[in-house]
Amino acid sequence: MFLRSNKRIKDGKEHYYYTIVESRRLGSGKIAQKQVLYLGEINSSQQSAWRKTLEVFDERQQRLTSLSLFAEDRPVPSDAIDSVQIKLSEMKLERARPYGNCWLGCHLWRQLQLDRFWTEKLPKGREAVPWEQVLQLLVVNRLIDPGSEFRLHRQWFDHSAMDVLLGQDFAVAEKDRLYRCLDRVLEHKQELLVHLRQRWQDLFAAEYDLLLYDLTSTCVEGEAEQNPKAKYGYSRDGKPNCKQVVIALVMTPSGLPVAYEVMDGNTSDKTTLRGFLGKVEALHGKARRVWLMDRGIPTEALLKEMRESRQETFYLVGTSKSKIKQYERKWLDLPWRKVRESVQVKLFAEQGELYVLAKSEGRQKRLPFAARRSCGCCENCER
């Protein structure tokens, strides 16, 4: 590296601007120069600030001391008592790594008290690296730059500051160690959800009276097809020739996951809701709770059960096409009611349910013509 000075005359005065430049030899033998740091103008009025740039620890006096920072080719001013000179020609930039994002990830880990939780669940044995630290590395990686365990092992760890923050060398990111850690975590899934629920409630005053429930699927290939849950089923990503697994998720409107489950790839959406109703009640207790779902998830029989046997459980779900046709004439006869500037609704109650037909002028303007023709705005809810 070297210090490059650029001279510029402005308003009859000379101004000097400095840049730290790095030279790299290419495979062709040529040398390419890269600007590493722009220092700007260093004039006489800024020299006093430069003279207090470096702070070192004086072991003899056991205190911090400020030293001046001057380039090798610049004379040290006579008034600079404590100073040090550097050789810019010998400066090197090696293994530059982001630190702040990794530090924040580790801080969140401690704020959620996951260090205490996993130290108890994964006590240290004869392993060279505690499993809690391996899991912390995996979680911070998912937070900052999600990828596979193999990518973390091959690339991400060396480009992060996790070795400094964890106080561990590359052993913490060994490939087999990362995979084995995931196997150890699975058995503590339910306890983890309970722990996170309590921490979210303490930190964010999270409430669980309104829950969103949905399902998705992801296809698998290669050795993953040997997974016993990998089955052929309805493919949401348009790959019916691939095996898949179904993932169900319950979350709050603020995006906090409450419960999840990985199920067989041929699982029907209509068979999943009853189990999650029980899981959420067991985890968060019985409460006045509203479930938001697509119309393909609950069956009419289950909705009836929710109305009759679960007095504190309510739902907001899209009306089935059969009921839209059944009540079409009744909707046509009802007047529109304006609920806001561009939204009008028609309401009527039938057998303990409140049906809502909504019309939004603003939404119609945003949708293309084909989508406006096929869009169903009917909602079926109970309050």
Image (tube, rainbow, N blue to C red):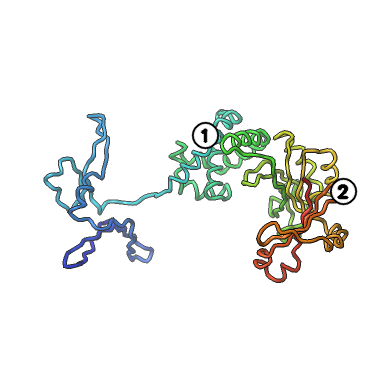
Asked if residue 131 can be seen in this view, the reply is: no
Q: Residue furthest left?
A: 78
Circle 2: residue type: Gln
Q: Is residue 338 left or right of residue 174?
A: right
The label number, if any, that marks residue 129 in the structure image: 1
Circle 1: residue type: Val
The label number, if any, that marks residue 328 in the structure image: none
Using the rendered view, name the quadrant where residue 120 is placed: top right
Frontmost residue, 232 versus 107: 107
Mark 1 falls on what kind of element? loop
Q: Earlier in the sequence, mark 1 or mark 2?
A: 1
Q: Which residue is mark 2?
A: 351
Which quadrant holds the N terminus? bottom left
Asked if residue 75 can be seen in this view, the reply is: yes
Q: Residues within 10 Å of mark 1 (few under 14, many from 20)?
A: some
Frontmost residue, 68 versus 21: 68
From mark 1 to mark 2, how far is it between C-alphas?
A: 61 Å
Q: Position of residue 65 (x, y in %)?
A: 24, 36
Q: Position of residue 310 (x, y in %)?
A: 81, 38
Mark 2 falls on what kind of element? loop
Q: Position of residue 255 (x, y in %)?
A: 62, 46
Using the rendered view, name the quadrant where residue 139 is placed: top right
Which quadrant holds the C terminus? top right
Q: Position of residue 125 (x, y in %)?
A: 56, 28
Q: Is residue 132 left or right of residue 251?
A: left
Q: Residue at x 52, y 39 (%)?
A: 108
Closer to viewer: mark 1 or mark 2: 2
Q: Residues within 10 Å of mark 2 (few under 14, many from 20)?
A: few
Numbered label tally = 2
Q: Residue at x 56, y 48 (%)?
A: 150
